[in-house]
Structure formats: C-alpha cells, structure tokens
Image (spheres, rainbow, N blue to C red):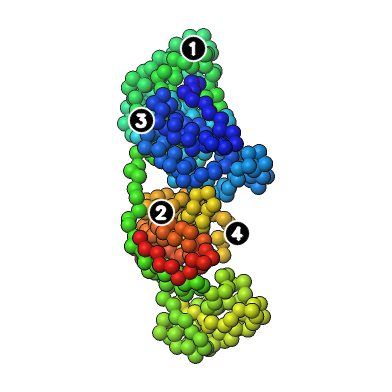
Amino acid sequence: MKFSLVATTGNEADVQIADAIAYAANDESSKVILACMEGIRDGARFIEALKMAREMGKPIVAIKVGRTEAGAHAAQSHTGALAGDDAIFQGIFKQYGVYRAYSMEEMFSVGAACAISPRPPSNKTVIVTGSGGVGIMLADDGVSRGLAIDPLPTAFQDRIKTIQPNAGVTNPVDVTGQVINQPELFRQVLDVIIDSPDIHCLAMHVGITPLLPGMEKHTRENVEYIRSRRPDMAIGLIGYFPGKLKEQIEQQGVFMVHEPTHATRALGAVTGFANYFSREATAPEPLQLAVKLPNQLGEYEALQIMESVGVPVVPMRVVKTPEEAAEAAEKLGFPVVLKLHSKQVGHKTEVGGVRLNLRDASEIKQAFAEIMASLSKHRPDVAWEGCLVAPMVKNGVETIVGITQNATFGPMIMFGLGGVFAEALKDVTFRVGAISEDEAESMIREINGFPLLEAFRGRPAADIRSLALTISRVSMFGKAMAGKVSELDINPLIVKAEGQGVLAADALISTVSGTGMDEVGT
C-alpha cells in the first residue's frame, strides 16, 4: 500500500484529526482517507472536515474506539479526550458517508479496496466460485453488507449449463473444482456474466489456483479480459497470489483478499461510497419559527409548540374537574385517554398519571379520581393543575423523535421506536443539526425496527414521507433552539397508514435554565 500522508495527532494540543482529514481531502495524491480516533474535541471543526471530504469525493474509512464504558474510560485516561456517546458517532458517520471499521485489518483492507476499485453504478452482484460452500458464505455475507445478490436470468443460467453441466447457475455460480482441469471454464463463465449490463459487482473465488502451474497466466488474462469489457465493474478476487501477479491485477483496478467475506465486505463499502457520492446533498426546506418558551413547560405546552412548527398533534383539552373531563370526552369522541397535567412531572406513567381506553363518562370520572389519588400518594409536593383529555389514536406505529444537546456536536436529532419500548430496546439513530427529509428517511430505514413501518400481512405501510417531514421539522426546531432547549421528546409520535400522516400524542421539552420566555425566530 502507498501512503501520501501519515499523521499521528497525539493529545491534539493544537492539530486535530479534523485538520488531518481536511488536509487529505484537498491532497490530490490521496484517494482514500483512513482515520483512527478516540474522541473529538471540536465537533464543528470535525463536521466541516467531513463535508470537505464529501465535496472532494474522498471516501473515509474510520475506526472510533471507546464504544463501551470500559473503552471510553481508557480513552479518557489515555489522551484526556472524552469518547462520547457511541450512538452519536454512529449517526454522524451514517450522515456523512463514513465507513466504520472495527479493526486495523478492516480499516486497511477496506481502504485499499476503495483506493483500487472503480465505484460501480449499482450494488447488483454476482458471485463466481469453484466451491459451493464458499459461494454460500459469500452470499450470506454479501446480503448483510447491502449487496443485491439476485438469481441470474434463466437465459444466462442456460448458457452456463452448456459450458459446465454440473455448475450451480443461479447466483452464486459454482463452476466446481473442475476448473483446475479446465482452466478455461472461468473465462467462459465470465463471458456470460459480463454480457449483463445490470451486473456491476463481482466477487470471484479462485482459491489456490493462481499458485498452480500455468494458472497464474490464466488468472491475469481473465482479469485483463473482464476489465477491458467492463471498466465500470467493481471486482474482488479471493485467493492466494504471487507478489508480482498481485501488483499486475491491482493495476487493473481489481482488489484481492485471502478471506472470502473480506471481498463482500469491501464491495459493500465500495457500493456504499458510490451511492453516497452520487446523491445530491439536500438542505432542509426553510422553516419559519416564532416560538416563545415559557419558564415551565408541561405536555400541553410542549405539544402546542410542536404544532406551531408544523408537527401534527392529537387534539387535547385541559380539564379541572371530572365533569369537565366527561364533557370534553363527549366532544372529542370516545374512547379517550386521560392524563395528568403537570409541568413538574415529566413521565406521568411513573406516578400513575395515565388511564387509557376510557369508553364512557363514568369511566372518565373514576379515572380522574384515581389519577388525583395516585398523584397525592406518589408526588404530594406537586401542585394540582388538572388533567388532559385526548382521543385514543387507533392504528399506527409508535415512534419517538427527539432532540438532545451534545456537548461536542450541539443539537442532535434522534429517531427510533417509541412508546414503552424506547428505553428498553434502545433502537434509535442520530443525526447532527438540521436535516432534510431525504436524510430523515435514511434515519428511518436504518433502525432495526423499520420492518414495523412496512406493509406486513395485510397491514398497510406506514406514512414514511410524513414521518420524514416531521423529523426534518423537529431537527430545524432543535437547531434554532440550540442553547435554549436542552431536550425534546415526542413519544409517542404515532405513524399512521400511508397517506394518513402522523400524530404527536405526547411531548416533553426541557429548557436551559434562565432562557424561558425568549422568542426565537428564523
């Protein structure tokens, strides 16, 4: 491997890793940036460096240590740098197209592949092997890396069968060990595959064949042939190669690995970068804000603020007596939810302050009395402000959207599964600053629970675009309120069926001390 620059930034008393990334981004002799970091001292400086790398088309492959509590403590004692919340870094890496490596081997191997390989137009991949088992291994890993490993068209399968009747022909293509006796089989099969303009990635397992007598020449010629026909294709060759052959093949823009899954790993990275750099960097639509923050904010006030920035909210009434609660429920329509109204209680369920699915006036009056009694028992210090009545929202997926102020990067937007599962599952993702709807949709699709938002067994798909718009608006609110709002949670934000929008059913806003009643506009 050839390096244009090696910089170790140490304790970063002056020069930071962001400076090294920015320098490499503008260095014409650098193709890929490799970075190993413990913590970031200046978040804005780091983000600017990532943006610069994007503008210059430079992939970044990074290791971020300090993922665990033990690792974070070790990082702090080593350089004095705070490792920070790993989920925050993971979100920023996703946002700015950084490939995250988890070992030095992975960083160098993936980085080398990205420096050598062209960026393919798609992730459509074919696997060719002389071993069926290795092909299955590659298929499993390739799918997990985001590669599309689809069956070859029937016409292609038929052509391969005429070449090698015993071959596995769907995808992976198993040429079988007969290739040792008939080295021309690889070329003949490759001839079929490169005829498809839709296939842009190739993982080819040649094993020890390049070391056998006469096979080095066949391997080199096969690579030269396929590269001459398909300069756009990303190719990973798996096997053992004499030193000179390795150099000749790399000059053809083909990377080589020993471990089979390292080929699919690298192809996943190469296609990921291709997709990232081909996307236009979209900015969020401007949002007009004129928001007054009271000194104290309860759920009702928080939802009103969210409604003012364009977030749809569940209709809600503040009531002071059981009779008012029953009257409000009649107007809103049964069934309803009755909740404690208090600026001093953030999580109402913890004090028995929520009653669901109330179906008539008698149930509401009883629930009202129970909430008052529960508040008196659990929080006698809290002043009684009444209750909130809202209709039960039928059907939909509960999600959470929030803002948190990070000491290094400032306001971060968070998205994940909501309701009672938010803290238990911790299936959330982050982005920094104000984000566009497209970036918000990327957030939505990367959580583990995303299948809950897709169509499933007769259940319609959720309204992803309305959800993305809401996340974008909340992120803009968070950026505008930097230094004033310390935390925001909309939980649950209920996502209804496609075309039916979203509804915020509960919200919590915490303000920075001393900033209440300020009006913020943008």
Q: CA distance from mark 2 to mark 4?
A: 27 Å
Q: Decide which of tag 3 and tag 1 comes sooner along the chain.
A: 3
User: Up-down: is 70 above or below 496?
Assistant: above
Camera-nearest label, 2 or 4: 2
> x and y percent of residue 253 in the render?
41, 22
Q: Decide which of tag 3 and tag 2 comes sooner along the chain.
A: 3
Q: CA distance from mark 1 to mark 2?
A: 50 Å
Camera-nearest label, 3 or 2: 2
Residue 244 is labelled as 1
Amino acid carrying mark 3 in the image: Phe
Residue that label 4 marks: 424
Q: Residue at x 35, y 53 (%)?
A: 284
Residue 434 is labelled as 2
Mark 1 Cα-neighbour bin, 10 Å: few <14, some 14–19, many ≥20: few
Q: CA distance from mark 3 to mark 2?
A: 48 Å
> x and y percent of residue 308 in the render?
38, 69
Q: Residue at x 48, y 42 (%)?
A: 46
User: Could you say whether the residue bearing mark 4 is in a helix, strand or loop?
Assistant: helix
Question: In this view of the protein, can residue 302 be seen by the observer?
Answer: no
Residue that label 3 marks: 156
Camera-nearest label, 3 or 1: 1
Amino acid carrying mark 4 in the image: Ala
Q: Quadrant of the C terminus?
A: bottom left
